[in-house]
Image: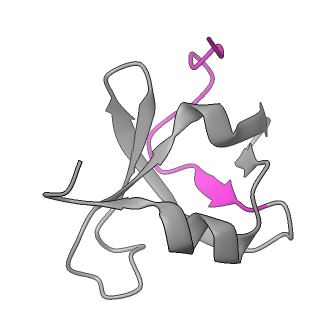
Amino acid sequence: MRDTSQIKEHMDVISSDKKTVGKVDHLEGSDKIKLTKQSSPDGDHHHFIPVAWVDHVDQHVHLSKTGEEVTGHWQHEGRK
């Protein structure tokens, strides 16, 4: 289990290839990060990424997946 205490609202979420894939809305339970609708490619849906993808947290949430892997495998609102 990763320490999620450093993950805060509106932090940028950065893929391993240095692409911003979204902004944190909030933690959904203890195992998912919900991204803001505004940071979604379509601007209409929340997306969820597993906390397990987090590599480390500083002023941003850094993931161990590339941008393509993230957007190809994140969960969409309503399909959790």
Residue range of the region highlighted in magenta in the rendering: 1-15
Residue 31: x and y in percent read 44, 26
Q: Is residue 77 above or below residue 18?
A: above
Residue 17, image quadrant = bottom right
Residue 27 forms part of the magenta stretch: no
Q: Residue at x 75, y 57 (%)?
A: 65
Q: Nearer the viewer, residue 76 or 45?
A: 76
Q: Is residue 5 left or right of residue 29?
A: right
Q: Residue at x 54, y 73 (%)?
A: 71
Q: Is residue 77 above or below residue 19?
A: above
Q: Is residue 39 above or below residue 78?
A: below
Residue 36: x and y in percent read 34, 60
Q: Residue at x 84, y 60 (%)?
A: 16
Colouring of the image? one colour
Query: Residue pushed farthest left?
Result: 78
Query: Residue pushed farthest bottom?
Result: 42
The quarter of the image holding the N terminus is top right
Q: Is residue 78 left or right of residue 62?
A: left
Q: Residue at x 84, y 69 (%)?
A: 18
Q: Is residue 67 left or right of residue 16?
A: left
Q: Is residue 37 left or right of residue 35?
A: left
Residue 45: x and y in percent read 23, 71
Q: Main secondary structure of the magenta part?
A: loop
Q: Nearer the viewer, residue 10 or 18?
A: 18
Residue 4 forms part of the magenta stretch: yes
